[in-house]
Image (tube, rainbow, N blue to C red):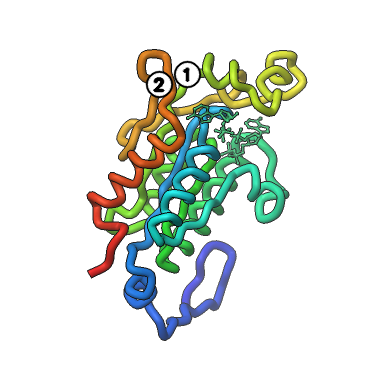
């Protein structure tokens, strides 16, 4: 019997089928590909491209997109620091469940605070948390501005916008860093292939 947070008198219920059996069924290993970066850096584009490429190879993935989750699970959260902390904690827990289900879980969130991303990494075992940093300049993201949010933030109509008047802490030890080369951004497919090579090298796309 345990007490966890505010939950008292709780018991852990074991499941008859374990992660190993699920992974065998899927011929892959569950993991979390955590994509972090500024708004407009290409997180969702990479997540979609990666999911498509994995699907083409017969690998099961699922995207947890920050914007989308804020339509449901996280609709009670805003963008002040404590809400962003809770947002990342919840998505980290959900991502852990998806990885435990044997899936390649692709989490795509700004996740601006290093401490929170590191806490998500700590939840996972066996190096199965793969942090991908979309290291695109604010200048590029702002020039893209597909939703017009930077424009609103610069005009003071959105307060606390990441990169403008709210912080973004770059990863120090991420597994994969994607950045502009000679002022050009690699194509979404090229970026997805870089992530897939990593997953292949580390054995996540097979199960012996
Ligand atoms: N103040 C502020 N700062 C940053 N982003 C904002 C803000 N307000 C709304 N949006 C929109 O919310 C999307 C980011 O949600 P996330 O859940 O990924 O953010 S966070 O990880 O909790 O920081 C983000 O989506 P992306 O552009 O895909 O990153 C924006 O569409
Ligand atoms: N690799 C890329 N090359 C060129 N344009 C891109 C690339 N990745 C994303 N974009 C464009 O940049 C904009 C922002 O991408 P998006 O994936 O929505 O970013 P985020 O999810 O980080 O906010 C979109 O208009 C998208 O089409």
**Of residues 90 and 197, the one drawn nearer to the viewer in this rendering:** 197
Mark 2 and mark 1 in contact? Answer it, CB < 8 Å. Answer: yes
Residue 178 x %, y %: 38, 30
In the picture shown, does residue 40 fall above or below 90?
above
**Of residues 72 and 46, the one drawn nearer to the viewer in this rendering:** 46
Q: Is residue 193 left or right of residue 112?
A: left
For the residues labelled 2 and 1, the Cα–Cα distance comes to 8 Å
Q: Is residue 146 left or right of residue 127?
A: right
Residue 190 x %, y %: 38, 35
Among all residues in the image, which is located at the extreme bottom? Answer: 16
In the picture shown, does residue 69 fall above or below 41?
below
| Residue 156 position by quadrant | top right
Q: Which residue is mark 1?
A: 137
In the picture shown, does residue 78 fall above or below 61?
above
Q: Residue at x 56, y 72 (%)?
A: 8
Q: Residue at x 41, y 53 (%)?
A: 54
Q: Which residue is mark 2?
A: 180
């Amino acid at each position: 019997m345990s007490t966890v947070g505010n939950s008292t008198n709780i018991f852990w219920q074991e499941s008859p089928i374990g992660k190993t059996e699920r992974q065998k069924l899927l011929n892959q290993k569950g993991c979390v590909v955590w994509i972090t970066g500024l708004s407009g850096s290409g997180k969702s584009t990479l997540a979609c491209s990666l999911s498509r490429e994995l699907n083409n190879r017969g690998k099961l993935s699922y995207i947890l997109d920050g914007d989308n989750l804020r339509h449901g699970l996280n609709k009670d959260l805003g963008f002040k620091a404590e809400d962003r902390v809770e947002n990342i904690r919840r998505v980290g827990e959900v991502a852990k469940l998806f990885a435990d289900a044997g899936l390649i879980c692709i989490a795509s969130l700004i996740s601006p605070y290093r401490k929170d991303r590191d806490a998500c990494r700590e939840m996972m075992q066996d190096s199965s948390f793969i942090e991908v940093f979309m290291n695109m300049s604010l200048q590029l993201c702002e020039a893209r501005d597909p939703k017009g949010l930077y424009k609103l933030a610069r005009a003071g109509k959105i307060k606390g916008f990441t990169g403008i008047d709210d912080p973004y802490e770059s990863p120090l030890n991420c597994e994969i860093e994607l950045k502009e080369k000679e002022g050009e951004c690699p194509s979404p497919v090229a970026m997805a292939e870089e992530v897939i090579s990593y997953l292949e090298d580390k054995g996540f796309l097979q199960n012996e």
